[in-house]
Image (tube, rainbow, N blue to C red):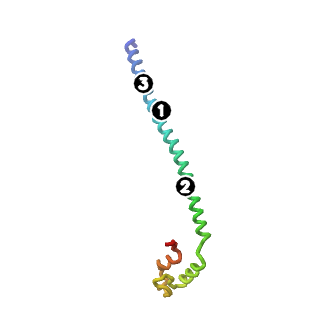
Amino acid sequence: MSKTDLYEQLLTIEQQAKLTFDGITEMKAVLSKVLEENAELEIENKHLREHLQELQQTTEETDTKDLSQGLSKSKQNLQNLYEEGFHICPYFYGSRRENDEPCAFCNDVIYGERTAD
């Protein structure tokens, strides 16, 4: 092997090493970016889980509150009449419901929320 061939092989190896080093540097930069994004997503995920847990607790408290309040005695009486097949709404009050069909007006009287106007 001549000195020029040896020198050319060394140049080729040097170029390949340089390309390999550049590739490693690029992979390192990409890996750093991915790790940074991963850390950000973990933090965001943690915050979202905490927020979801707060919302679930609020919903559970609201549901518990609604169940504990229930219907007033007068609304329970109206519900009993409705279940017996009578209209309790102002539009058809006292008339029998045909085939026990549901009435949106009656349901609004029983279950609808009233606001102070």
Relative height, residue 94 to residue 15 (above, below): below
Disc 2 is placed on an element classified as helix
Disc 1 marks which residue? 28
Say which residue appears at 55% left-offset and 52% top-offset: 49
Q: Nearer the viewer, residue 13 or 3?
A: 13
Give the amino acid at mark 1. Lys
Residue 112 lies, in percent from the top left, at 51, 74
The mark lying in front, picked from 2 and 1, is 2
Residue 77 lies, in percent from the top left, at 58, 81
Disc 3 marks which residue? 18
Q: CA distance from mark 3 to mark 2?
A: 50 Å
Disc 2 marks which residue? 52
The mark lying in front, picked from 1 and 3, is 1
Disc 3 is placed on an element classified as helix
Give the amino acid at mark 2. Leu
Say which residue appears at 49% left-offset and 85% top-offset: 93
- Closer to the chain start, of discs 1 and 3, is 3
- Closer to the chain start, of discs 2 and 1, is 1
Structural crowding at the residue carrying mark 3, measured as other residues with C-alpha within 10 Å and reported as few (<14), some (14–19) or many (≥20): few
